[in-house]
Image (tube, rainbow, N blue to C red):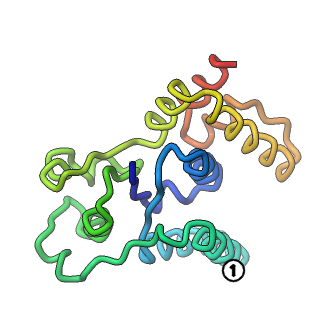
């Protein structure tokens, strides 16, 4: 399954690390566009120059890890598409060009299911999608969650619980599923 990942999933960090960690297990193939990555870098710039520099470094690492993940769509494709927020049309165009199966976003209202269905796509919420992955493949997904937890503890110096970290990362159902699965 190919999933185009929206910028609001790539940034914030914990959500991105879990989503891409699950992708590394082979449960799906991630995709994005240069514009989506640029949106991530611009969002991180709000933290200051260090935030943007770190995001650009992480973007370079991401592109090196998945050299075929970046989708480039023809600009004229955007002209035939419509979404409630015109600034999201590029995401839909990239998903169509990349023959994606889904768009992963936390922005449900700007990606109406009926419009995506017309293009052969579905919208997936990261929390629900990851919860499903965890329940179907606990042996592959749980280690990802625990690795992200360990890294969050190391970097923050806080003694996070898995559930609290995932709740803060807007992945509460996923965190609950991982705890339930052991």
Q: Secondary structure at mark 1?
A: helix
Residue 10, above or below 40: above
Give the residue at x 17% y 82%.
Answer: 76
Whether 150 is drawn above or below 68: the answer is above
**Residue 177: percent from left, percent from top:** 58, 23
Please give the residue where the numbered disc 1 appears in the rendered image: 49
Q: Position of residue 8 (x, y in %)?
A: 47, 57
Vertical order, 73 against 129 (above or below)? below
Image coordinates for residue 140, horizontal then vertical, percent: 63, 35
Q: Nearer the viewer, residue 99 or 163?
A: 99
Residue at the extreme bottom of the image, as rendered: 75
Q: In which quarter of the view is residue 142 placed?
A: top right
Image coordinates of residue 91 in percent, x first then y, are 32, 65
For image coordinates 81% across by 42% down, the residue present is: 150
Rendered residue at 39%/48% (across/down): 1
60 left or right of 77 in image: right
**For the C terminus, which image quadrant?**
top right
Which residue: 39% across, 58% down? 4
Q: Which of the pair 172/119 is nearer the observer?
A: 119
For disc 1, the neighbor class at 10 Å (few under 14, some 14 to 19, many from 20) is: few
- Asked if 70 appears above or below 169 in the picture, the reply is below
């Amino acid at each position: 399954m190919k999933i185009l990942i929206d910028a609001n999933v790539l940034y914030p960090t914990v959500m991105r690390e879990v989503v891409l960690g699950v992708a590394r297990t082979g449960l799906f193939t991630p995709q994005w566009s240069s514009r989506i990555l640029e949106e991530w870098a611009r969002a991180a710039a709000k933290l200051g120059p260090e935030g943007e520099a770190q995001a650009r470094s992480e973007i370079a690492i991401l592109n090196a890890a998945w050299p075929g993940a970046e989708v480039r769509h023809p600009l004229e494709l955007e002209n035939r598409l419509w979404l409630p927020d015109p600034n999201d049309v590029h995401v839909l165009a990239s998903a169509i060009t990349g023959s994606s199966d889904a768009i992963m976003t936390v922005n449900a209202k700007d990606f109406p299911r009926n419009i995506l269905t017309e293009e052969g796509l579905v919208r997936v919420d990261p929390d629900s999608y990851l919860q499903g992955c965890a329940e179907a493949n606990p042996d592959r997904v749980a280690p990802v969650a625990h690795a992200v937890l360990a890294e969050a503890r190391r970097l923050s110096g806080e003694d996070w619980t898995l559930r609290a970290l995932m709740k803060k990362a807007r992945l509460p159902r996923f965190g609950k599923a991982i705890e339930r699965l052991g």
